[in-house]
Amino acid sequence: MATEIDNGSMNKRIHVVHNHQNEAMTIAEIFDAEKYPQLTAVTGELSATFLNRYLGAFVQLEIALGNPSSPRHYTSMETVTKDALANAMLKVANKDAIKLFLRLSSQLQMMALAGILKVEIAPTQALHSRFYLLSNPQTQETRVILGSIDLDEPSFDPNYNRFEDVYIFDNDPLYDNLLNHFKLDLRPVLISYFSNHLLTKAQEQLQARKKANPDEEGDSVVILTNEVTDELVETEMTDLIVDDVQHQLDRQQLRADVPLGMRNVTLNRTRDREEAERRIRQHDLVYKLQKQAVSPRAARPKIKQRDQIAKQIHDDLQATVFPQDLAVEKKYTTFLYDRPLERNITRNQTGLYTPNDTGTYPLPFGQLATISQIKRSLKQIEAVMNGYAQFVVDYTPEYGKRFYEAILYAFTAPFLWEIREKASLNPEDGNDIPNFLILGASAGSGKSTLLRVINQLTWGTDKSMIDFGTIYPMDANQRKAKTVQALESYMKQGSTYPVLIDEIEPYFFQQRQYSRRLIVDTMNQLVNSPKPVAPLIGTTNYHTGFTMQRETARRTYYLQLDKVIDNEKKPVAAKYIFEVRQGLDNTLFKDFVVRMANLLEDDGTPWRMFDAKTGQLDFLAMTRRIFREYYKLADMPVPDYFADGLCDDFGENTRSKWAKLYLAKEEDFRFRPEKNSLIFDISKLNNFNGFSADAENEYRNALPVELCVGGINGKTGKFVEIKATAFYKWIGIDDPHTKPTPEPEADKKVVTDEQPKKKKKSFWARLFG
């Protein structure tokens, strides 16, 4: 960086005016510590490099750090809470003051410890002033410096493409005016930037070093460890709120209603975030347009022709406005926005919003129901369940739990992203709270009806379902990939109402490029960066060959509805369910979201509840609690189809699949005693041997990787190698290779040395007995 500011004709970016005349001056001449040994300043930026290089010679320094200009105009209260206090807290959290202190020279560190160097901030006031007051108490000479500059290098570097003004007035009456302004108006709201805790830690380190090396001469620089600075952050953040803000309240330097403003600081935060996200997207677009406006192959980069640029701008703007084909986009029409920062439990405001009929503004969603309304709603669900009980072949209460679980999941769906954040100790724990519910159902099992019932119980209509096969027409190019892209778009509209998809085709689960793209990648994004993403509730035709990738199953709640409605009773069943659906509404769901919002706001809510049988995290535990309260309020018994824990249907399905295969083809599982493993030729699962064309992949996907010798390598290729003991335990069969050896009979003669030895068995006899 140049130390002299050139005011010549080639440089007009830094304009220096000294006593009303343009003048070329160096930084050292502007901040002349020899002539003016004291400096009082209000600046926007302060760098350690600038302090060390240009301000170290001052005898006394008092520097107040101001705030950067805000991109928006805040109200009076927002200036305190969202601007000044928020910035002060961020500075503490980011260790800005600590980093500045540690980068100072040992001389300046000692000046800070001695109180000669003071750096201060205004934690509750937006300080936009910029002025520098230099003085000499002996000669009574003074200097005032005004302008746009800060105490950092870029402010004085002419190579930056920006204009800066520096106005210098020596021995001007303005000095007294600004000094009084600083003392009377600014200093009362300032606090030390270098906290007492920081200075104490530095002093302790210097004293410890002096004690250990009493003969050491010269200054000693202070360097603090991360552990120490982490502790400082916690203490300083606490002091900032508990002491500094309260002190200013007590001295009436702040309005008495500031605590109320702090409590309401998250109001309209959703709007602020959306504006920020829109600005980011806008920046991405203009950066892209800038890059594309320059010819990529020219030896000397130059701007493209006007028509080329105009076409590029048109295409990019159109792509931004219409990210999806309009016909596909319009299939998704149900929006329920979860905004927890807007939640106010004292007013029963859930933080959920729906657009009004014209989409011009949001309406709050959620309303407490009366006991009679709760009872009527429970009767509605009971009528639905009674329909399945009457008309499904071989129905049992255990089987009915699947239908009820689907309803509970749908009720919880808008809040799943919040529950995931509260229940996860580590990011990967988020996979235990799946954003996908898949109903693997046989044709004629009533799965589509269940999806419509869910839609009515939560939204009050049955028009929100989307048929997977009709998202794109059959003749559309890249139909499969574009269908998955459409589903992803539906889920990421910002709404948290579940996307209801009927008849998902099997390829979606079986082919990794599709299930991975939507389920695995989406869940990975959610666990690493929690945000509102709509859950997906979908049905797919179940048959004995249904399977999905293990990584997909890990992130999916799968319920198997493999029993069908009695064919002879279908006419009666259709009439019954039609009449039941005429009376369904979403009164209970509106009440439920109020109660769930209260649980989410309660820090004592136990979100990490585990199933005693499976050890799984029961992410529906609080939903079950609310529904038990409903039955108690309605004075109704908890029904036998009420599940106390999650259903592990995918695990049961895969276990059953391999158990049947073993029992039918036991001779094909060859035991390998030296590794206690089983070798199975999975290529035998083909059409020639009576299996389906996809059977090999289905069985391979259904085999847990933890049962395979060598992990994933054990389940690839022609032969899969399985851990014998673990496999037999998994499929529920006694391990035939670890049966205890029978005790020798009492009347058997003991072989002695005189008796002839038995003939040694051959290799094959030893191996196969």
Image (tube, rainbow, N blue to C red):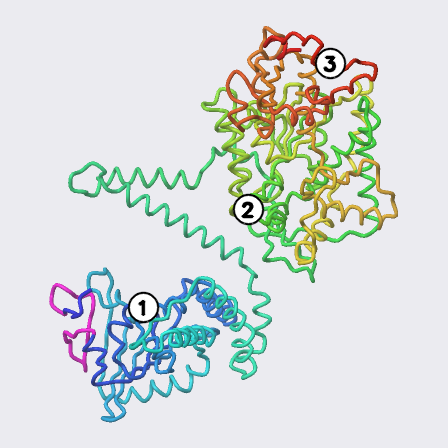
**Residue 296 location in percent, x, y?**
23, 38
Image quarter in which the C terminus is found: top right
* Residue placed most toward the observer, 504 or 137: 137
Q: Earlier in the sequence, mark 3 or mark 1?
A: 1
Amino acid beneath label 1 = Ser
Sequence-wise first label, 2 or 1 = 1
Is residue 509 visible from the viewing direction of this image?
yes
Image coords of residue 74 (percent x, y): 47, 67
Q: Residue at x 54, y 70 (%)?
A: 238
Circle 3 sits on which residue?
751
* Residue located 83% across and 14% down the image: 747
Which three-letter amino acid code belongs to the residue tagged 2?
Pro
**Residue 355 appears in the rendering:** no
Q: Please name which of the two marks, 3 or 1, marks the residue nearer to the observer.
A: 3
Residue for point 63% across, 28% down: 502
Magenta highlight range: 7-27
Local packing at callout 1 (Cα closer than 10 Å; few below 14, some 14-19, many 20+) is some
Using the image as rendered, state which of residue 610 and residue 299 is in the foreground: 610
Q: Residue 427 got which mark?
A: 2
Q: Which residue is mark 1?
A: 47
Q: Position of residue 263 (x, y in %)?
A: 59, 67
As drawn, 1 above or below 468 = below
Residue at (21%, 65%) from the top-left corner?
Answer: 157
**On screen, residue 673 above or below 624:** above
Q: Nearer the viewer, residue 551 or 391?
A: 551
Residue type for callout 3? Val
